[in-house]
Amino acid sequence: MEEMMRVARLMMIWVLFLLTFGSNCSFLWMLEGKYIEYNTSGNIVSDKINVHLVPHSHDDVGWLKTVDQYYAGANNSIRGACVQNVLDSVISALLDDKNRKFIYVEMAFFQRWWRQQSESLKAKVKDLVNSGQLEFINGAMCMHDEATPHYIDLIDQTTLGHSFIKHEFGKIPRVGWQIDPFGHSAVQAYLLGAELGFDSLYFARIDYQDRTKRLSEKTLEVVWQGSKSLGSSSQIFTGIFPRHYDPPDGFTFEINDVSPPIQDDIFLFDYNVEERVADFVAAAIAQANVTRTNHIMWAMGTDFRYQYALSWFRQMDKFIHYVNLDGRVNALYSTPSVYTHAKYAASQSWPVKTGDFFPYADQEHAYWTGYFTSRPALKGYVRMLSGYYLAARQLEFFKGRIISGPNTDSLADALALAQHHDAVSGTEREHVASDYAMRLSIGYEEAEKVVASSLAFLTDSQKGFAQGSSPKFQQCPLLNISFCPPSETNLSKGKGLVVVAYNSLGWKREEVLRIPVSSMGVVVRDGAGREVESQILPLSNISIVRHYAQAYIGGSSSSSPMYWLAFSVTVPPLGFSTYIVSSAEKIGQLVCIASILCTNSDNSTDFLIVPCMQWYSTGVIPTSYNPEGEPENTIEVGQGNLKLIYSADGKLTQYLNIKNSVTASAEHLYSYYKGYNGTLRNPQGSGAYVFRPNGTVQVTPEGQGTLTVFRGSLLDEVHQQLNSFVHQVTRLYKSKEHVEVEFVIGPIPIDDGYGKEIISKISTNLKSNGTFYTDSNGRDFIKRVRDHREDWDLQVNEPVAGNYYPINLGIYLEDGTKELSVLVDRAVGGSSLVDGQIELMLHRRLLHDDDRGVGEVLNETDCIRDSCNGRVVQGKFYFRIDPQGQGAKWRRTYGQEIYSPLLLAFADEDGNDWISSRMTTFSAIDPSYSLPDNIAVITLQELDSGEVLLRLGHLYEVGEDKDYSVLTNVELRKLFPNKKINKVTEMNLSANQERTEMEKNRLNWKVQGSSEDATTPARGGPVDLEKLVVELAPMEIRTFIIDVDSIKMVLKQDGASGAV
């Protein structure tokens, strides 16, 4: 009976097959149905739902495996992923059928693959690109993170990828594809989207509550205006996938996937064409019901798919063929570019989105806000080398780029990889993090040679010394742990230490430098031979120096520094100044600390006058007395306008600026959140991605001597060992009006069975009304309101983690009379959970994975010899209180100086010939000129063509500051006083197309609620080609390719230059 029914069904299928297809020419029937030619030439049909099938593979440039392991298919015990197989297989499949399409994103992988191909295959791939079968989407070296990178790094890594595509294929990517980052920034929308010339941007991850509302209101696709300053002039069409960046359930076709394939051979069992077509139509209608217009996109792929591409394309061929024969909906091979233009052609008005998409949660207790801080040492290393790379490129330009010799390319490549959303984010496995760090170190070593040779060239005032006489400059990449062998040299017998400080900013800087030295008997002179005010300070972390020197140099250092030497420097814009450190004939007042103040365990204080050497080497306190004028039971710190008042038990109580009359109660404490370990009922724990606290514990001082104050002519320091794993130094510079806090945290103890997430809290009496502001990748500041979202009514499930935001530049709050601002030296997470209070998460060490794919506990360790301990992190943050409306000047100016610290290089001086024989000061720009205070040089780089890539950025938003939020001019001739400017061409942000072409091709999207009377955002006008003046509007970044000829220079000892 069953056999008869099977035969009957087979006969019925056969009859239906003949009735359906008859003599239709869209296929060939040959030899018992062994071959079907599928019609894959689907096009858009205006009166049907159009399902755009977009084949893609999301290829992380490092995560569970390193970038090279992923490319080559190595270390497959972790994951069977081989990007080389993906590209080989995809190209072959595309060549088999001209209708098939594929998009590729990560140029770091494609560039590796491209180098290995034959010229004949390269020609075929270029044909695929030219025909639109293979399209580069995003086109950057990686799919960068959007929470933790600095905007300059985002620009650089995108430019690198776009340059490769333009050079090899002559193509310009038109679409952003940020499908996997864990939240999305405003800078991504307007800067790394619209300003690149992208027509659209697509991604997957938004908060689960936000997605629910958008699905119900059909607002998954919007026009995103990320910048309040640039507004509609820099908007972008943005599409959010209704689920993830994979196909609907039942339509994944990797070789081991479980989705049922179409079985269309009637002579085999399990024929299922009608069933699978019905599944396809149902899924398409479901998505169309939450999408505007009759166009929907299916992202046909996910992580590391298409290793056997035919398994995907075979099924998509069949679906396009049979679905289109069915006729209820229309299916076609497509790309995001095709999809975008179909949406645009629909002439629909779209809702407007402002702000950003942070924080991101994928379920009730799972806020992905922990990664804002995860792996803080790597985050700090990336940020430090980012600023170094900016300076190195400038110096490379001043000397002249050498393509075949040492250059900055290796560092550029390493920094580009480090922006990946599983790199600087801290969400990769530890061996992968080590791989990123190694690549950065290799890149630094080559760039270091560029810097050294450039400075040797620029300090050579005669440009013709005998070979071998050029100075040998050394640098100190481990200066953060007080390890700097060049500065610890023995200065006896007439030897001197040459310190060259290079300033990569466009304005003059006056700062206090600190370098470690082994002797307190030193004196500092400037390039003119004048003695410079200096100060000796004790080195508080000698044990850390010795410990980590073993890790970084493979053994003990030959000597250990004993002191910090602090001295005042003045450095011209885009230039350097030189200082000579030598042995002093006698120790004068300007060279040594005169006083040390300690608190005791009984809260009494001792104010000491002792020789620095005796204090540090023995710890002996021979005498003490009560200083005159010191209020009883309080300690005042600060020699300049800014004062901090401490109680006798070592707690900060008051902030006072006598210059601007700002007074505020203030408190600075450390605490930690216990990481939630998870339970059987609620397993979500705190991990590399997710921040889920389980109670807060305040860090309380342990032992005696909780506060030590060092006072001097340049700065005061407050040293505090708060407990076994938190130490900090608070600095107040006499000439500055902000507080610098240097912290050393770790190893974080975990022997109580709990991971810990260390926070620092600054509390004031400001009434901030639940409102604070955080930056977007170091650019715009975005308003945050506690327990609130602009786009939906927030259901508060995690009152701490759900109010954390990424911070790259700073965070501030205000109350109508005062502003409290905090700036950071790397990406961190932070919030204001209490009015008047700002907290930063500085370090994390956890005991459980958060089940988001990395499969490894965030428990960083450093192993030296046979001993492994939790990682110790050193870093800085800065804070200041200003009158209302005056804080932006400090945030913007000092924020630039944090990102671009003075670059220090050291050389030996034997005798006193340096000043007489070498250039001691230099500025690349006209000596009568400096950049306006609201403008920064974002990029100054010589290209392989010999042309110059210049980016200038306005640092302020509209309305941010009454003086600086204005249109501002930059004079190019004064930026290049020794160059003949032949041609200036304005480009888009990534410099792969002229700005005029980008604007001509820009899609003008209709938005809901727009008015013809709406104010047009301010933009700088065209470059005055006669005067060569560039105008910049608030938040505007303008990019130029400049054709220049060098003019022979005569360098003078004052650092000026004259043309002859």
Image: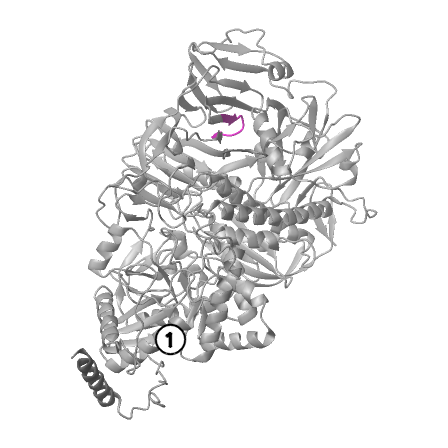
The location of residue 244, given as percent across then percent down, is: 32, 59
> Can you identify the residue that label 1 sits on?
314
Tell me, yes or no, if residue 733 can be seen here: yes
Which quadrant does the C terminus fall into?
bottom right
Mark 1: few, some, or many residues within 10 Å (few <14, many ≥20)? some
- Front residue of 29/1050: it is 29
In the rendered structure, the answer to whether residue 660 lies left or right of residue 279 reads right
The location of residue 697, given as percent across then percent down, is: 34, 27
- Front residue of 555/943: it is 555
Q: Quadrant of residue 455?
A: top right
Dominant secondary-structure state across the stretch colored magenta: strand
Tell me, yes or no, if residue 987 can be seen here: no
Spot the residue most to the right.
466
Q: Quadrant of residue 808?
A: top left
In the rendered structure, the answer to whether residue 536 lies left or right of residue 142 reads right
Residue 433 drawn above or below residue 560: below
**What stretch of residues is rendered in magenta?**
729-742
Residue 397 drawn above or below residue 709: below
- Front residue of 821/827: it is 827
- Residue located 35% across and 69% down the image: 340
Residue 988 drawn above or below residue 294: above
Indicate yes or no whether the magenta region holds residue 741. Answer: yes
In the rendered structure, the answer to whether residue 1055 lies left or right of residue 71 reads right
Please, what is the three-letter code of the amino acid marked with disc 1? Answer: Arg
The location of residue 253, given as percent across then percent down, is: 36, 68
Spot the residue most to the left.
1
Question: How many circles with numbers are drawn on the protein?
Answer: 1
- Secondary structure, mark 1, is helix
Indicate yes or no whether the magenta region holds residue 551. Answer: no
Q: How is this picture coloured? A: one colour
Residue 338 drawn above or below residue 637: below
